[in-house]
Each structure stands twice: as structure tokens, then as C-alpha cells.
Amino acid sequence: MKKTAAWLVRYALEQLKVTHTFGIPGVHNTEIYDELDKSETIEPVLVTHEGYGAFMADAMSRSSDSIGTLVIVPAAGATHAASGIGEASLDGIPMLVISGGVRTDSQFAYQLHDMDQHTMMSPITKKTYKVHSHDEVVSTIFAAFDEATSGEPGPVFVEIPVNFQLDLGEVSSLPEYQPKEVTLAEKVQEQLSQAAAILAKSSNPGIFVGWGGVEAIESTEKIAELLNAPVSTTLQGLSSFSAKHPLHTGMGFGPAAVPAATNAFKACDCLLAIGTRFAEIATGSFGVTVPENLIHIDINPQVFNANYPAKLAIEGDAKLVLEALYGELMKQTIIERSNDVLVQIKEDKAKYLEQWFAHDSGDRVNPARFFQSLREQIQDDAYVIADDGNHTFLVAELMPCYQAKHFFSPTDFNCMGYAIPAVIGTKLANPDNQVVGIIGDGAFLMSQTELFTAADKGLGVIFTIFNDGELAQISQAQQTPYNRKTCTTLPNLRFEAITRASGCQYIRINTDEEVQAKIKQALTYIEAGQPVVLDVNIDYSKKTRFTQGIIKTNLQRMKLPTKVRMISRALWRRV
């Protein structure tokens, strides 16, 4: 049979149950877009910038069972999308990137968009593919999907030259996609017996969960309850353990963590780490103390012993590993542990919240008051998405997350401008759920053009701006060591004008007294399918525990001459 590569792309994506594609049509992919327009199951979404399309695709993968998919033009489309692809790469998020390519049958050199995309994409993808015949199209896209979703997930790039899209070519068959079965390696069972024995004999075990454990939340809860072990999460893994659970402590467990986590893990003699790399943010800038008995579970063996040596390194899918580990623990005689940890966690959480409530925010909005009202008014299964900045750690410390995959933010790549498009991608994937973005004013400026996309699609979502007129996270980081701020003050911005121009609703919250009513008003708008920008006059004067902790940790890690110079300069400028 004869088919065009464009038709074959549509067929392959339909087989993979792709629901949306994101991108911009151009010279080298218009045939694919023409085919996508015929699909009954795939909606191609026009974005204002391919980078924001990549953030939408990233969010779709994080919040649903459908893989986020880009359809972009080569060269400029790929470079624009690179930030979103890089975020997915470092955060371990599956993504399909389908790019057009220049003609492979041309007699002419220097074609439009003619460049080596694979060299450029190689560092930020798991693998790149280039199609060389019509018969390769479907099998290549299936292979790319398997690569993107197996092992530690990540983005995969596929280039399909435009001549194959335009021309009919011979295809031997149209295979149906067959998902691969995931199993545990034989050696894992023996390791799990050892792990269970170590955990059962530990006096104060603790559990640390990253995004890699987000699918294993039920087993994690059962193991935590069996061991009476406190549970902390990474920033990216905040939704990997419900904040409603009495053993939940919060993000991190070192000096940059909230008191509930710091105190609960102070005497930890055995740490069960699930789906985490022990990366910089997760460890409060490498400020945690990890016990000798570290049992590290991850699907990517490269993360083992990278920063902290593991007593046991168990390679495998966290969901399967934890199910089997729970079975092994049930065979053990477990040391009976006091319920004091539950009491301590509850008291520490209450005291920390009271500290925030007691903070005088003056004529601005107290973050704790805002998040308390937001949590009370939105549904338990609402999605909350934070951008990168000071507000990220306010969300982590003050906004409880109750369900798996219902909170996420850009983490290891740390890309500002993520949340507006991610909110859109999440809402498209989950049309029946409430979706709220928490976005710094600087981050909002980066991707505010996608407000037009939200309005055009009639997406009832909330884009919350934490508006303080600064790049607050960096501003705070400058103030302590330098006693001055450089290049972090934003221009006088008219967010209402931008919002109204896009067709979204606009609400301003000036003081604590307005918070409850204005959030209620925003929820009324989104129920009617209207996107709304909630402009919050936020108070950033109280530092998060994370900010305080990493300043101390980074200072301690500096060489003595550098440390002396930094402290002396700050003191001199203060005088």
C-alpha cells in the first residue's frame, strides 16, 4: 500500500492514544497538520511560541496518561522548544517531539532550516531519530514512544523530512502498537529481603519520595504505616505522598526543610529513598545528612551513589518494587515504635503555620492567609502548578497537596515561564478538574502571551500572579551576601491591561481582608469557562525555610577565603 509520511504520523499518534499536539505549522510540517485536522481523536493546539508548547506537552505528560507531543518546524521551532524539552529531560518527563526536516532528495544546498538538529537535540533528549523511508515512520514513532516512557522517562526527538510527508511511498504494513510489559529483575527480590530486614530492625526509619515514586503512592502509604515512619518528599515529588496523611512532614528533611520534617528526621537511622536523585533542590543545596543505612530505589541506576552512598541500591520501577517490598516487610517482625512522631509532626505543622499567621504583612497579602483560603475553597482533586521563583517554595511549605500528580513545577532545569502554558496543558488533559497556577510576576512576563491561547480555548483556569515588583528569589539571595540588589527590580507593570487584551478576566487582591471573597469570585469565573488572572499584592518579607536553609548551607560549603570575603563584604556594606 502507498501512504504519505504525514498520514502515517497521524496513524501512529492515534495508535499511541495521543490526545493533543502542540506547536506551530510551517513550511516543513503543514502536511502533518493537515492530517491531524482530519483526526477524530487528536486536537492540534496552536501556541504562540514553541517553548510554551513544550511546557504544555510536559504538563500533559505529568497530569495524565497521554504523552505530551510537540509537532514543530525544524531549526527555529526546535531551538524555541529547547527550554521546554530541557525541562522535561532533567525532570524525567516523557515527551514526543515530532519535527519536520528539509528535503533529502534535493539537488540544492543551503535549504531553508537546513541544520543538524540531532547534534543540537542530543544533550536534552534520551534519543533522536531520523526517518529515511515511508516504511520507517510508524515503527520509528513507536520506538520513540517506548524510549520516552521506559526506564527513566524523558523527551525523544523524531525528524521526518518534508519530502516523505508530501510524497506517497510504499508501506509494507500498518502495525498496531503493543505496549511493553514492565517486570522486576530477578536480583531485586533478594535485595528486597535485605531491605525489609534492615527497615524492620531500624529504630527510626524515614521515607524520602521523589517524582519517581508518584505512581506508587498507595504502597508508600502502606509501608509508612507499617513502619510508623515519617515521610518527606522532594519539591518535584510533593504529590507523591498525601499531605492529609498524619505521617506526611513536608518537602526535604534537612536544615532547609520545614520544622515538621527537620525534627521527624533528626534521629533517622535508616532512610528509604524512592525515585529521587538527591539533587540540589531536593537536598536543600546538599545540606541533608543521610544515614549509613540508605536504601535507594530508582529506575535509573546512574543516580545510585552519585551524592550519597547507598547500603542497598535497588533498580526498578518504584510501583513494582514497593509492592514487593511491602510483601517482604509483612514477613518481618517489626520493632514497635512510639506514636510520638505523629504528635510531633502535627504540633510542628501547627506551630509553623502560626508563625506565618503572626507575621505582619502590612498592607500586603500574607502568603499563609492566601494559601489557607485557596486550599479551603478549591476541590481536593484540583491541580496546582507553580512556576520557578520564591513563590515555588511558599507553595511547597504552605499549600498542602492531597492527590498524586496534582502538584508540579519546573525543578531541576528550573525554567521560569513554565506555569502559564503548563496550566493550559493540564486543563486540556483534565477538563473536569480545577487548575490553578501560582506564578511570580517575573515568570508571568515570560509566557503571558499564552493567555490568548487560554481565552481562545475557553479554558476555565486561574493564573495567580504573586506580584511584588521583583525577581524575589534572586533578590533575597542577593540581599544577604551583597547587602544590595542588582537587576532584580521589575518595571511598573500593568497586568490588568495585558489580561484584558487577551480576553481573560482580571481580579486584584490588595489585602488579607479581600482574599476569601476574591478567590470565590475567581472560582465563579472558571466555572463559566472563563480564564482569570488573580493579581495578588503579595508579601515576600518573611523568608521560607528553604531560602534560609540554603543560604546557610551554601555559605558553609564555601572555601574559607571565599567565605571570609563574602561575609566581610556584606558587613562592610551594611556599615
Image (cartoon, rainbow, N blue to C red):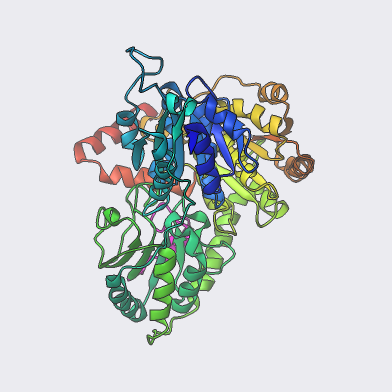
The quarter of the picture where the C terminus appears is top left
Asked if residue 543 is positioned above or below residue 215 in the image, the reply reads above
Q: Residue at x 55, y 58 (%)?
A: 404
Splitting the image into 4 quarters, where does residue 460 fall? top right
Residue 308 is covered by the magenta coloring: no
- Visible in this render: residue 413? no
Which residue is more in the foreground, 574 or 314? 314
Any part of residue 390 in sight? yes
Magenta region: 251-269
Image check: 470 left or right of 535?
A: left
Q: Is residue 193 above or below residue 455?
A: below
**Left or right of residue 186, residue 352 in this image:** right
In percent of width and height, residue 495 lies at 66, 25
Query: For residue 159, which quarter of the picture?
Result: top left
Image spot of residue 398 (x, y percent) = 57, 51
Residue at 46%, 42% (x, y): give it: 95
Spot occupied by residue 126 in the image (x, y as percentages of width and height): 34, 43
Nearer-the-camera pick, 569 or 534: 534
In which quarter of the view is residue 116 placed? top left
Q: Looking at the picture, tell me which residue is in the foreground, 229 or 413.
A: 413
